[in-house]
């Protein structure tokens, strides 16, 4: 119920404007967002790298409805790739196709994706196409498939809450694609997504096993200890080394678990979001854990 409400609010403009007007609102995103500027994000990336983590940068934004704005997002990401390479990193970014124009012109979004994948390839970097709500899944997979890029420099996300994902995973494995597996963060109807957590989790384990067994390099993105243990157990049974896949987690979520996995010798990549457009991302993080709403209220009261 609370999850559904928060996800509903994440898509609405008026609550965003109201929230941003409250005293203390400026400080809200700090827990989950690395700052508003690229300099803020770079400082975080340097800290993560020194601690032994990988990173992927998300320049926050989604649902762009004008070509000019989509072009501006693409140029920002090109500059980010160049800057990361200049600073000596292998650039790694996560992008949302709606920020590159998917909702208004699929061909435009694909051209932007091609530019980014090519620039990432030149810097020996990587572009991950995040997966958004179900109305965009088919178009996102199509854009990913049709983008002429090396599989070393471009990957996509699959959500275990979607009923279609088993078939999508099969097809992606067959094409040699690199997949990040997640549970899924959007509000979805029962016709397309499993409504019960137990089914989402069971599907997550099934898909993680398929991906690991495929021999490709995939990412298991979760903070759920049961999903992590199932992945580790399967890999151990199948003699798949910890260098053949990676775990991924969100900036600011379960930091202790992030460090613990590194300590055990696993690869861990942190998803680092930054930028002014933090509202929908922030609301989805609140929806994932009801206790986060208390954190929100405390921050607002303290100002
Ligand atoms: P689950 O929700 O069951 O949480 C397990 C435990 O983790 C919770 O009990 C809690 O302790 C902790 N936890 C989880 N979320 C938390 C939070 N926000 N704050 C505090 N604690 C929290 N989704 C999507 O639809 N498209 C995408 O492209 C991506 N990309 C992506 C990248 C990466 C690197 C990650 C880790 C996740 C995503 N997601 C995503 C989000 C994903 O779909 C999912 O919503 C969250 O990861 C939460 O699900 P868990 O697997 O962590 O399990």
Image (tube, rainbow, N blue to C red):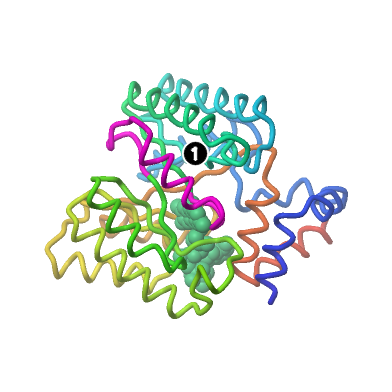
Task: Name the side, left or right, on which 99 lies relative to 125.
Answer: right
In the rendered view, would you say 125 is above or below 32?
Answer: above
Q: Is mark 1 within 8 Å of ligand 1?
A: no
Residue 45, how many percent across, how many down?
47, 37
Q: Residue at the location (67% across, 24% down)?
A: 68
**Label 1, residues with CA under 10 Å away: few <14, some 14-19, many ≥20:** many
Question: Which one is in front, 263 or 94?
Answer: 94
Judge whether residue 254 can be spotted in this image. Answer: no
Using the rendered image of the protein, determine whether residue 174 is visible from the camera's viewpoint.
yes
- Please check the rendered image and state whether residue 105 is part of the magenta-colored stretch, yes or no: no
Question: Outermost residue toward the left?
Answer: 239
Instruction: Classify the position of the C terminus by image quarter.
Output: bottom right
Q: Looking at the image, which residue is at 70% across and 73% down?
A: 2
On the image, the x and y values in percent for residue 70 come to 61, 30
Q: Residue at x 68, y 49 (%)?
A: 29
Residue where numbered disc 1 is placed? 57
- Assess whether residue 140 is covered by the magenta stretch: yes
Q: Is residue 118 above or below residue 253?
A: above
Residue closer to the observer: 35 or 197: 197
Secondary structure at badge 1 equals strand
| Residue in view at x 28 percent, y 67 percent | 231
Q: Nearer the viewer, residue 292 or 259?
A: 292
**Would residue 215 be found to the left or right of residue 218 on screen?**
left
Quadrant of image for the N terminus: bottom right
Q: How many marks?
A: 1
Would you say 135 lies left or right of 67 here? left
Residue 227 screen position, x and y as percent: 36, 70
The residues colored magenta run 131-155
Q: Position of residue 220 (x, y in %)?
A: 35, 58
């Amino acid at each position: 119920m609370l999850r559904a409400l928060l996800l509903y609010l994440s898509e609405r403009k008026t609550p965003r404007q109201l929230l941003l007007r409250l005293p203390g609102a400026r400080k809200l995103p700090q827990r989950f967002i690395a700052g508003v500027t690229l300099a803020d994000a770079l400082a975080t990336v340097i800290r993560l790298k020194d601690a032994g983590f990988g990173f992927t940068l998300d320049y926050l934004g989604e649902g762009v409805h004008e070509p000019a704005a989509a072009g501006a997002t693409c140029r920002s990401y090109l500059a980010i790739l160049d800057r990361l390479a200049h600073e000596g990193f292998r650039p790694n970014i996560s992008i949302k196709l709606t920020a590159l124009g998917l909702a208004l012109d699929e061909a435009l979004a694909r051209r932007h994706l091609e530019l980014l994948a090519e620039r990432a390839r030149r810097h020996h970097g990587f572009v991950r196409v995040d997966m958004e709500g179900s109305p965009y899944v088919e178009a996102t997979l199509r854009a990913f498939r049709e983008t002429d890029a090396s599989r070393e420099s471009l990957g996509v996300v699959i959500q275990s809450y979607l009923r279609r994902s088993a078939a999508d995973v099969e097809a992606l494995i067959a094409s040699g694609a690199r997949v990040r597996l997640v549970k899924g963060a959007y509000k979805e109807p029962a016709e397309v997504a499993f409504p019960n957590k137990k089914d989402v989790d069971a599907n997550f384990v099934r898909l993680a096993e398929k991906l690991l067994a495929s021999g490709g390099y995939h990412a298991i993105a979760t903070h759920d200890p049961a999903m992590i243990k199932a992945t580790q157990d399967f890999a151990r049974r199948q003699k798949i080394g910890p260098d053949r896949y990676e775990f991924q987690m969100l900036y600011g979520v379960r930091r202790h678990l992030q460090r613990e996995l590194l300590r055990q010798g696993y690869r861990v990549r942190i998803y680092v979001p930054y930028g002014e457009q933090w509202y929908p991302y922030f609301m989805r993080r609140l929806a994932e854990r009801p206790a986060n709403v208390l954190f929100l209220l405390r921050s607002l009261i303290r100002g």
